Amino acid sequence: MNTTDVPLYQPEWLELRERADAAARAVELLDPLRGWLAEAGRPGGLVIHDLGCGTGSMGRWLAPLLPGPQHWVLYDRDPALLGRAAAQTPATTADGAGVTVLTRRADLGELAAEDLAGASLVTASALLDVLTRDEVDALVAACAEAGCPVLLALSVVGRVELSPADPFDGEIAEAFNAHQRRGGLLGPDAVMVASDAFALRGASVRVHSSPWRLGAGESALTAQWLRGWVEAACEQRPVLAPRAEAYLRDRLAACAAGELRVVVHHSDLLALPGTTGGAS
């Protein structure tokens, strides 16, 4: 789930959301992924490319859930984040095999099929919704040419539920979704666009819900998310700002009192190539 551009890639935000991300990711997609990987066969182990890795939370979640030796290739524009991710990558996999890591400082807009040569799996978390249609098409084309599965987690879908409800919730949500689509970004439309793009290239596509469910135990994350959600909405529609100030104050008070529950809906997408023979 992405909020505003400013805090999105700060380590503090990424660390704050890691536990909620791990709880939300769709484990239901792992069995078909494992099945495809087992059928494809990788005697030397898996080579997993993690796009926009941040602090490496995807690797910390996924590496222990897949068997066999793994070599992770981590991509990010921020060298400090790459360093953190590499240092915190799990040492072993689901069956105790080893994990090795390579970092690449790169702009994902320039990712090409040759960068993914030999990949067993391409993965990313909270990435799709900050891409444009052209960027998604380029990413899908590169992955299709590489002939490997793709697991893209935690893309926003434009639905948020707050309890207790407030009449102003809908206006904030609508403005936030418009903010997510600014400048041609796909925002809540990203999963649908990516699904269609993979299907057009012959992939079998599965989408599963992966919501954040935030309660009293996640009050710090909820408060930070609320601030970013309202700020982005007001940036998109400044006319909301006068009412939003009181709204945010009341919501933060309820959060601090343990009285607020929030469900932030996301979707995870798994695209499996049409045949294992296409894997390189």
Image: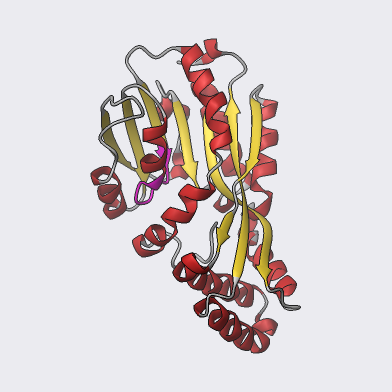
- Vertically, is 257 above or below 111? below
Question: Which residue is rendered at x = 42% and y = 32% of the image?
Answer: 65
What count of labels does the image hold? 0
Q: Is residue 73 magenta?
A: no
Q: Nearer the viewer, residue 133 or 30?
A: 30
- Vertically, is 57 above or below 194? below
Q: Position of residue 218 (x, y in %)?
A: 48, 65
Q: Position of residue 249 (x, y in %)?
A: 57, 86
Q: Position of residue 221 (x, y in %)?
A: 47, 66
Q: Nearer the viewer, residue 261 or 125?
A: 261
Question: Which residue is rendered at x = 34% and y = 21% of the image?
Answer: 68
Image-quadrant location for residue 196: top right
Q: Which residues are magenta?
A: 50-57
Please indicate, yes or no, whether residue 233 appears anywhere in the rendered image. yes
Q: Main secondary structure of the magenta part?
A: loop
Q: Nearer the viewer, residue 100 or 98?
A: 98
Q: Quadrant of the C terminus?
A: top left
Q: Is residue 14 left or right of residue 97?
A: right
Q: Nearer the viewer, residue 127 or 131?
A: 127
Q: Quadrant of the N terminus?
A: bottom right
Question: Which residue is rendered at x = 58% and y = 21% of the image?
Answer: 273
